[in-house]
Image: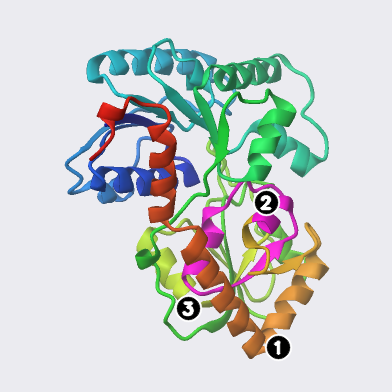
Amino acid sequence: MHILVTADTVGGVWTYARELVTGLVRRGVKVTLVSFGDIPVPQQTEWMEGLSGLDYRPTAFKLEWMQDSEADLEASAEYLESLVRETSPDLLHFNQFYYGALRCDVPRIVVAHSDVVSWWAEVRHQEPPDSSWMRWYRKVVSRGIINATAVVAPTRWMLDQVSRYYVKPDFSSVIYNGRTPSLFNPHLTKDDLLVTVGRLWDAGKNAGLLLQEQMPCPVCIVGSGRHPESQGNAFDRQARTGVQFEPPQNEKQLSQLLAKAGMYAASSRYEPFGLAPVEAALSRCAMVASDIPTFRELWEGAAVFFRSNDAQSLKNAVSQLVNDRELRQHYANLAYNHARQRFSSERMVDDYLTCYQTLVPVNALPA
């Protein structure tokens, strides 16, 4: 089987694509991978070494959620159409909505990782204001969904948002994202350290919540403060005792940090899935999670929940774990075992291969 996969290099979709593509190639699937957004730096592509069944095509086309992206998307669609003619894949796996309407006869999956309207509704508590760009965006997202052979979402909650704000897919399924457990170290002695990871400029990630109250332990906030469409730092790094800011970490650095951290704060107000909490759980961090539908779906019974966007509630939850080491160890073990069972890359690849089998001819499937 030959699959053409699209990805972007800006956020967690790149990590997701790495796990999926690596797993597929090791199962005997040939993959053509096309990336959009920034051209990746060398450390972002180190994982491709030794994957002989992978053909990688990096591009710098803008992403569909970016303003003034219409011309780039039209050009990138033409590029993909020519690439389909060149490589003759059996299946198209798109991680953007726009390409669901690509002009070709190949079956295609559209994965709904996130979208502008549901982000706005959860963070701003209302749908985005009407504008010519927003009308265009809603139109192309709906068109991509309608023309997809199948739509996949990483949570039931995210799939519901697609139907709520755009159109109900004809065929859909939920496949949880996954990470490779062996990339993380769950065996080190833990520090009294609370970590959160994510785009600091994204109000949906809500990292600033950790600055509103003095936490009962040291805090480390990891991630970029620069919006990909701006020049400056969009995150107000307020001074607070015991808070350390770190730029985006490579995989080895992040693994080392999470291995030492006793707790992880999943502070998001909007989170269609969240790979960073999975990475923390695989590092045996106790999970302190915002009480939003996604985290309830994913982490019920394996995390201490706090009221969403409530700094005092977050502080109280963290204090519970700081003051009771046995409780913290209990929740760390719960999160670790939960992540290994439900959010491994092996399970994710299995689920996608099962989905592919319903869409491609039998003779194209890997042996």
Is residue 229 or residue 323 the one in the foreground? 323
Which residues are the magenta region? Answer: 269-297
Question: Of all residues shown, which one is farthest toward the front?
Answer: 362
Residue 346: horizontal and vertical position, in percent?
Answer: 38, 54
Point out the tag, 2 or 1, that comes first from the N-terminus: 2
In the displayed structure image, the side of residue 77 where residue 313 appears, left or right: right
Q: Which mark is residue 323?
A: 1
Q: In terms of secondary structure, where does tag 1 sit?
A: helix
Separation of marks 3 and 1 at Cα, in angstroms: 18 Å
User: Mark 3 — residue?
Assistant: 260
177 versus 149 height, above or below: below
The type of residue carrying mark 1 is Asn
Residue 41 is left or right of residue 179, and the answer is left
What's under tag 3, amino acid-wise?
Answer: Lys
Q: Position of residue 289 (x, y in %)?
A: 68, 64
Which marked residue is nearer to the observer: mark 2 or mark 1?
2
Asked whether disc 3 touches disc 1, contact meaning CB atoms under 8 Å apart, the reply is no
To which residue does mark 2 refer? 294
Residue 277 is covered by the magenta coloring: yes
Marks 2, 3: nearer the viewer? 2
**Marks 3 and 1, the one that precedes in the sequence:** 3
Q: Amino acid at mark 2?
A: Thr
Residue at image coords 75%, 69%: 314
Q: Quadrant of residue 156?
A: top right
- Say if 365 sits above or below 14 in the image: above
329 or 366, which is in the foreground? 366
Q: Residue at x 38, y 40 (%)?
A: 353
The alpha-carbon separation of the residues under discs 2 and 1 comes to 28 Å
Q: Is residue 241 above or below residue 151?
A: below
Q: CA distance from mark 2 to mark 3?
A: 26 Å
Across and down, in percent, residue 347 comes to 42, 53
